């Protein structure tokens, strides 16, 4: 393991108490470079996956992951499950959007650039999306933790599926069009405002269009429904 990652692990372990801000400082002090993460790069991930995702280190009460973002890759709208604190560092020109969820309604708070080298804090309440709007692939470093050790730090992460009108729970990647076998449970009644729903639908459709042909009958039906709703939302 690169010395910078070993340094990050030790910096986190030295903390008697940790917050998102302290996690960001640990990542900054570790001075990790993109080349330190290339062992876990996965830009050729399956096209059904919204991005590449690899676990680097499981520390019991925290985990370190590397995500790979090919041009056009965007995560679904999501939170981080059981994680109570975290930090994310981008090594390319990413885009970051933040959402607010209240009374079953998901709305957009902000859409902003996530510049290379920038580190953002992650708290338990964060609902967001990260993606690569550029023409160049890049990696990102993700650290998530809890107060006490547990099997899945980001287990029971919520995906906000505005086409299905459901919150989906998963213990794995937060991908668009997640297969049913990867959804642990669902809650119906989710709604979104126009701006948020349009962005969601456009990006879900873009992911489907990148998947390998032939598409299943179910995905073809989803794509047609997305096109119809996008047309109505733009009208």
Image (tube, helix red, strand yellow):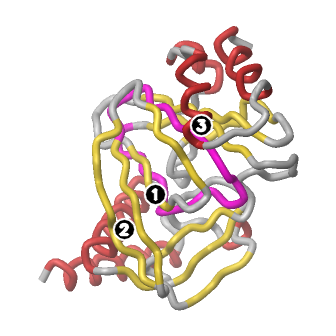
Labels 1 and 2: the sequence-earlier one = 1
Q: Quadrant of the N terminus?
A: top right
- Give coordinates of residue 53: x percent, y percent: 62, 41
* CA separation in Å, label 1 and label 2: 12 Å
Residue identified by numbered label 2? 200
The residue at 27%/83% (across/down) is: 228
Task: Specify the farthest residue to the front.
Answer: 16
Looking at the rendering, the stretch of residues picked out in magenta corresponds to 71-94
- Give coordinates of residue 221: x percent, y percent: 44, 80
Residue identified by numbered label 1? 128
Write down the quadrant of residue 206 in the picture: bottom left
Pick the residue in front: 218 or 50: 50
Q: In the rendered image of this protein, does residue 181 appear above or below residue 38?
A: below
Write down the quadrant of residue 79 in the picture: bottom right
Residue 142 - label? 3
Query: Nearer the viewer's eye, disc 3 or disc 2?
Result: 3
Pick the residue in front: 222 or 194: 194
The residue at 50%/18% (across/down) is: 34
* 231 lies left or right of 130: left
Q: Is residue 77 magenta?
A: yes
Using a 10 Å C-alpha cutoff, classify the residue at mark 2 as few (fewer than 14 neighbours), some (14 to 19) or many (20 or more).
many
Using a 10 Å C-alpha cutoff, classify the residue at mark 3 as few (fewer than 14 neighbours), some (14 to 19) or many (20 or more).
many
* CA separation in Å, label 3 and label 2: 23 Å
The residue at 28%/76% (across/down) is: 227
Q: Secondary structure at mark 2?
A: helix
Q: Is residue 92 magenta?
A: yes
């Amino acid at each position: 393991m690169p010395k910078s990652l070993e340094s990050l692990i030790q910096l986190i372990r030295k903390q008697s108490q940790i917050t998102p801000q302290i996690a960001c400082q640990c990542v900054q002090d570790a001075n990790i470079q993109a080349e330190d993460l290339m062992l876990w790069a996965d830009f050729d991930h399956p096209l059904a996956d919204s991005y590449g995702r690899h676990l680097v280190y499981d520390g019991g009460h925290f985990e370190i992951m590397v995500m790979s973002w090919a041009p056009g890759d965007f995560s679904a709208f999501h939170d981080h499950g059981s994680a109570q604190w975290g930090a994310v560092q981008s090594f390319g020109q990413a885009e970051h959007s933040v959402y607010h969820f209240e009374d079953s309604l998901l709305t957009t708070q902000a859409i902003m650039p996530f510049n290379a080298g920038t580190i953002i804090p992650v708290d338990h309440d964060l609902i967001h999306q990260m993606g690569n709007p550029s023409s160049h692939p890049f990696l990102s470093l993700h650290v998530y933790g809890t107060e006490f050790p547990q099997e899945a730090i980001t287990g029971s992460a919520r995906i906000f599926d505005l086409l299905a009108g459901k919150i989906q729970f998963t213990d794995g990647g937060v991908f668009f069009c997640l297969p049913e076998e990867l959804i642990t449970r669902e809650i119906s009644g989710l709604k979104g405002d126009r701006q948020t729903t349009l962005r969601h639908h456009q990006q879900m459709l873009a992911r489907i269009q990148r998947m390998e042909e032939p598409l299943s009958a179910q995905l073809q039906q989803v794509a047609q429904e997305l096109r119809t709703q996008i047309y109505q939302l733009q009208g």
